[in-house]
Amino acid sequence: MNKRIACLWLICLSLLLFSCGDNDGSPTQPTTGWVIGWSMNEDTSIYTPKILKTSNGGESWALQTLPAGCEGFQGTDISAVSHRVAWAAAGHANEDTPTGGILRTTDGGSTWMLQTLPDGMITRHIKGIKAVSATEAWAVSLHGDVLHTTDAGVTWQIVLVRTAMGDIIDMQRVNRMDVIGQDIWIVDMLGEDLGVVHSPDGGATWWRESLPDILVPGHGPLVISAFSSLVAWAAVKEEGNLWWTANGGRSWNKSNDYLSAGVDYDDICASNANVVWIAENGNTFGGGFIARVKVTDGNFESNIAYHPPYKMEGVSPMTDEIAWAVGFKVPAVEPDLPLGAIYHTKDGGVTWQSQTLPSDALDVNFWKVSFVGARR
């Protein structure tokens, strides 16, 4: 009996230690999240990237200190790995200025380090980043430089984007990327119907994939989200439909339904093979919305929540029910409100709770969000 009691105590102690340990990315522990954006000094008009973190599921948020060398940049993307490790991307506020960088923290954001980028890039304006692990990540620049590291960013390698026949694929304007396993997906907004650029083999070979029935001339895909090696979702600039593939990009389908027209889905993320969360930036007067869309045979079943006066720019779903979203306020509207907003839902997007921001982050415009264990 004593041995049995002793074993039970050891089991309980082990469970207690596990539950108090570091957030390891499990969807059952959605407590650690990171938000990236920027602020502008009104006296100098100089932008600076900003990163906030929560370690307690949004009960409190803290603004983090970034290193020197980030002046003039805006935060463009964030990718959470664990309570300690995250990667961030930045680019110059003037997109014609080819500077930017990749930042990484290994101590929960107490310190961030700007990493050394390789020579030979078209631009160092980093538009997207996606961590695979604490040591491996992919990144892409505004004009299509694809970067890969497997040593925690000590070295970044330029990955040639070429077909199996050796032809180089030039991308003109990248807005978003996603990575799952060996599949890397990038969207080239000026690539029109061939704007999805995809590698199924870890960057060894690439091809352009065709999106059917794009209505706006000159426009291409703005955002992309991969759920698996077979299933991925995309949305096109100024069109409110969704496009999806169920065969790894060999063919794409366009939805019958749409949520809006003439505005952009600035972020999408699939939490299921047929459930997509959407951050829509709206207009310069009323802001935008967050939607959770279930797609069946191209038809939508949607939960839509408007958040005036905020333009919604980023979304990070943990599950089909739990998600986080961020955005920034439209200009010259309700000046007493914070410039940025963070929202959280636990019921599939039916209701959202606005998060309380620290006093030193009221002037931050929020752009993207990533929670440990989430799809984004």
Image (tube, helix red, strand yellow):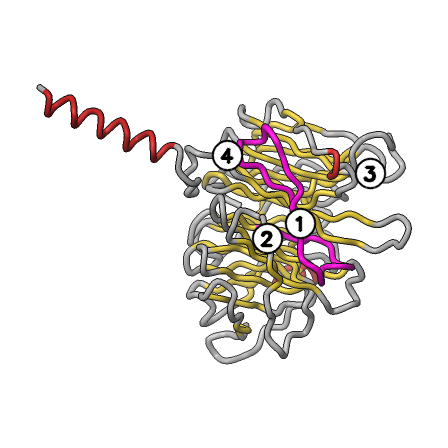
Earlier residue among tags 2 and 3? 2
Residue at 49% of width from left, 57% of height from top?
A: 249
Name the residue nearer the viewer: 201 or 35.
35
What amino acid does circle 1 point to?
Thr
What amino acid does circle 2 point to?
Thr
Name the residue nearer the viewer: 112 or 227.
112
x, y percent for residue 220:
67, 57
Label 4 or label 2, whichever lies nearer to me, is 2
Earlier residue among tags 4 and 3? 4
Q: Which residue is mark 2?
A: 111
| Magenta stretch contains residue 74 | yes
Image check: 227 left or right of 255?
Answer: left
Earlier residue among tags 3 and 1? 1
The image quadrant of residue 191 is: bottom right
Residue 326 in the image: above or below residue 95: above
Q: Which residue is mark 4?
A: 31
Residue at 85% of width from left, 30% of height from top?
A: 336
Q: Which residues are magenta?
A: 51-78
Mark 3–mark 1 distance (CA, rounded to whole Å): 26 Å
x, y percent for residue 41:
84, 50
x, y percent for residue 317:
53, 37
Earlier residue among tags 2 and 1? 1
The image quadrant of residue 194 is: bottom right
Mark 1–mark 4 distance (CA, rounded to whole Å): 21 Å
Q: Would you say the residues marked 2 and 1 are in contact, meaning their CB atoms lie under 8 Å apart?
A: yes
Mark 2–mark 3 distance (CA, rounded to whole Å): 31 Å
What amino acid does circle 4 point to?
Thr
Residue 65 numbered mark, or none: 1
